[in-house]
Amino acid sequence: MNNYHYFSRFAALAGFPASPSADFATLSALHQRWPALIPFENIEVLLGRPVSIDVEKIADKLLSKQRGGYCFEHNLLLRQILEEIGFRVTPHLARVLWGQDKPDATPQTHMLLTVALDGVRYLADVGFGGVSLTAPLRLEAGEQQGYRLERFSQEEWLLSMKSGGSWRLMYRFADGACEQADILVASHFVATYDESLFRHNLMMAKIINGQQTNLFNRHLTVYGEEKRQQEAASFTDFRALILSFFTADNVLSETEIRAIYEKVG
């Protein structure tokens, strides 16, 4: 009898079929529904709270409490769910290049997964805050679905996304797997390093009404047919913006929202 402990909890929220198969259709469906259900957010780090990489604690936060999290939380939980279904999953750490013109080395502060299926490897990543990937990518050189994978070296891949008429760097990662201890160190660094962007800025992302929606501090950007932007001019505006990323009521207290608002002022 299959043990779908974490998958069943996700399926109950997402309206997912109760008996999944370890095939491409299931992998694609999970990847599509995830960023429309669970937001990327760094609220715990911003408020100076510890972030756990224990899967049960992550599931309690993301599924039971219907909050969100950053890459380590998202992709560790996705890994557990995929492995419950029967997928072969490998975790990797990546060097984030977002905002850089050149793929120069940065600390390994991002986590992603690769999934082996029918002789093909796929990149699966539901925790990149700048843009929410909504589908797995074949781990091969070339363009696909608005993204481009290329060999950075014999050991590393480079991922970019199409932005207008050019390509925007996302991250580079090695073929080899990382260990849980590596993930622990990377997550701790992101959450506690004094100059980490996550400690001083609110960053949220989700697919809302089919559109990539990002909140950076008090500034909301919606990437639809036309790019729309909105600035929260008051606490009331900010409260409405931040709560729009959550599907459940009362996920944050008024005290927490006020603390976030003052922190990003």
Image (cartoon, rainbow, N blue to C red):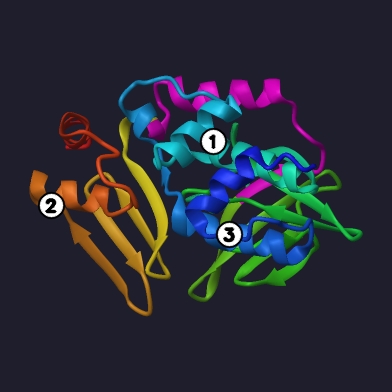
Q: Amino acid at mark 1?
A: Glu
- Which of the labelled discs sits on residue 29, or is there none? none
Q: Is residue 244 left or right of residue 132?
A: left
Element class at badge 1:
helix
Tell me which amino acid carries mark 3.
Answer: Phe
**Considering the image in quadrants, where does the N terminus appear?**
top right
Task: Say if 186 sits above or below 125 in the image.
Answer: above
Q: Which of pointers 3 and 2 indicates the residue nearer the eye?
A: 3
Seen at 42% across and 41% down, the residue is 68
Which residue does the image show at 61% across and 22% down from the upper left? Answer: 184
The segment highlighted magenta reads 171-198
Q: Is residue 176 magenta?
A: yes
In this rendering, does residue 127 appear at all? no
| 220 in the magenta segment | no
Name the disc covering residue 16, or none. Answer: 3
| SS type, badge 2 | helix
In which image quadrant can residue 173 be found? top right
For label 2, the residue is: 237
Look at the numbered disc 3 and give the secondary structure of its residue: loop
Q: Nearer the viewer, mark 1 or mark 3?
A: 3
Give the Cα separation between the discs numbered 1 and 2.
28 Å
- The reply to whether callout 1 and callout 2 are in contact (CB within 8 Å) is no
What residue is pinned by disc 1?
Answer: 73
Distance between the alpha carbons at the discs numbered 3 and 2:
34 Å
Q: Where is residue 118 drawn, in percent x and y?
A: 89, 60
| 106 horizontally vs 180: left or right | left
Q: Residue furthest right?
A: 119
